[in-house]
Image (cartoon, grey):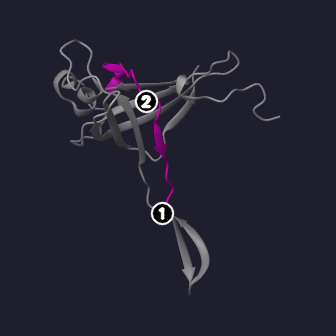
């Protein structure tokens, strides 16, 4: 039976790492909301013949979009560990990070690796890699805690998904 002996995964099994080119600088996010989401879109052109469906053609490529939120601590740190904001915006402590956009463009990007661990010993973890990610932040003040939300785009049509070896 499909899925036998396997367990469903949830927010306790995920970990998000942000890294620069060649993974020289990395941060592992703490205090995540556990709400990472991403969208893969395949555009299709539906061709009609006098109003009747005739056939389909591949449409333009669409980059992956992703979003997640963290419980806010600070925008800039005075220590050695960069914040998410610094790393993604290439500012303050993240100013030394090297862009993953190596195609000669002038847009600064990072890579994001989301690992879904398994709570059982019979399965391998999966790593979902988003490359050349750029994006925007939204800060929200809250009663219990403030949040920082990230909405971004990865310069790829689908993330790379691999089993951890």
Q: Which residue is rendered at x = 41% and y = 46% of the image?
A: 65
**Residue 159 numbered mark, or none:** none
Task: Indicate the position of residue 150 as horizontal and vertical percent values.
Answer: 34, 38
Residue 102 rendering spot, x and y as whole percentages: 29, 36
Left or right side of 150 for 6: right
> Is label 1 in a helix, a strand or a loop?
loop
Residue at left 26%, top 20%?
82
Q: Main secondary structure of the magenta part?
A: loop
Q: Residue at x 49, y 48 (%)?
A: 40
- Residue extending farthest to the bottom is 50
Q: Residue furthest right?
A: 1
Q: Which residue is mark 1?
A: 59
- Helix, strand or loop for disc 2: loop
Of callouts 1 and 2, the N-terminal one: 2
- Report the front residue among 25 and 88: 88
Q: Quadrant of the N terminus?
A: top right
Q: Is residue 74 above or below residue 51?
A: above
- Please identify the quadrant where the C terminus is shown: top right
| In front of the other: 85 or 44 | 85
The residue labelled by disc 2 is 33
Image-quadrant location for residue 124:
top right
**How would you rate the neighbour count of disc 1 (Cα within 10 Å): few for under 14, some for 14-19, many for 20 or more?**
few
Reply above or below: 80 against 12: above
Marker count (numbered): 2
- Please report the bounds of the magenta region as a residue range: 21-43
């Amino acid at each position: 039976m499909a899925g036998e002996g396997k367990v469903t995964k949830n927010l306790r099994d995920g970990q998000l790492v942000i890294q620069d080119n060649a993974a020289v600088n990395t941060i592992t996010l703490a205090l995540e909301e556990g709400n990472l989401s991403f969208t893969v879109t395949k555009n299709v052109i539906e061709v009609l013949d006098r109003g009747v469906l005739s056939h389909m053609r591949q449409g333009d490529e669409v980059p992956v979009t992703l979003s997640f939120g963290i419980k806010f601590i600070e925008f800039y740190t005075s220590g050695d560990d960069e914040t998410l904001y610094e790393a993604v915006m290439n500012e303050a402590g993240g100013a030394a990070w090297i862009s993953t956009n190596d195609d000669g463009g002038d847009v600064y990007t990072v890579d994001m690796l989301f690992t879904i661990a398994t709570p059982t010993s019979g399965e391998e973890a999966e790593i979902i890699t988003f490359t050349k990610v750029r994006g925007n932040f939204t800060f929200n003040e809250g009663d219990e805690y403030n949040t920082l939300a990230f909405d971004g785009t990865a310069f790829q049509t689908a993330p790379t998904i691999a089993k951890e070896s």
